[in-house]
Amino acid sequence: MTRQSGYPLVERPPGATLFRRDGLAISADDLLRDAEALAASLPPGRYLLNLCRDRYAFAIAFLAALLREQVCLLTGERSAAALAGLTAGFPGCVAAVDDPAQELPPGLPLHLVRPGKPALARPRAIR
């Protein structure tokens, strides 16, 4: 898949395995399909704060931000106070999280990323 600018998001054959989760292979096609599905489901906004801890969830959230031409904010901070300070300078920011228990500052919209749920991750068995 290629962004509008013409740069490829993934430089691997469509069937190439990029991730393994729970004994299943996830191909480049699966990754891009899941990123497109997530991009379509994200609320509008210029900034996406990617707080996903799972590597696959993080990757699809990052790619979804690229597909929507959003700025993807990254931080190792997880406290609500630190996140409030970070997001104060980014109006309309939305947090992408894969842990529903993630503490967020009041008023910061949350978008739950669930790899392996419908519309995300159609993995195949590893041979």
Image (cartoon, rainbow, N blue to C red):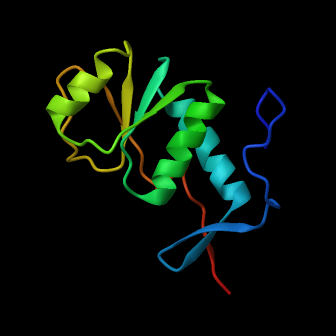
Considering only vertical position in the picture, is 91 above or below 103?
above
32 or 122, which lies in front?
A: 32
Which residue corresponds to the image point at 37% horizontal and 12% vertical from the top-left? 91
Residue sitting at the far bottom:
127
Does residue 35 appear in the picture of this structure? yes
23 or 105, which lies in front?
A: 105
Residue 20 position within the rendered picture, expressed as x and y whole percent measured from the top left? 56, 72
63 or 87, which lies in front?
A: 87
Q: Work out which quarter of the rendered image holds the N terminus and state it.
A: top right
Which residue corresponds to the image point at 68% horizontal and 48% vertical from the top-left? 32
Residue 123 position within the rendered picture, expressed as x and y whole percent measured from the top left? 60, 67
Residue 9 position within the rendered picture, expressed as x and y whole percent measured from the top left? 72, 44
Query: For this view, does 102 lie left or right of residue 124?
Result: left
Query: For this view, does 107 lie left or right of residue 96?
Result: left
Residue 69's image quarter? top right
Query: For this view, does 56 lie left or right of residue 32?
Result: left
Considering only vertical position in the picture, is 33 above or below 28?
above
Which residue corresponds to the image point at 22% horizontal and 19% vertical from the top-left? 107
Which residue corresponds to the image point at 50% horizontal and 42% vertical from the top-left? 61
Q: Work out which quarter of the rendered image holds the C terminus and state it.
A: bottom right
Does residue 116 appear in the picture of this structure? no
Residue 31 position within the rendered picture, expressed as x and y whole percent measured from the top left? 64, 54
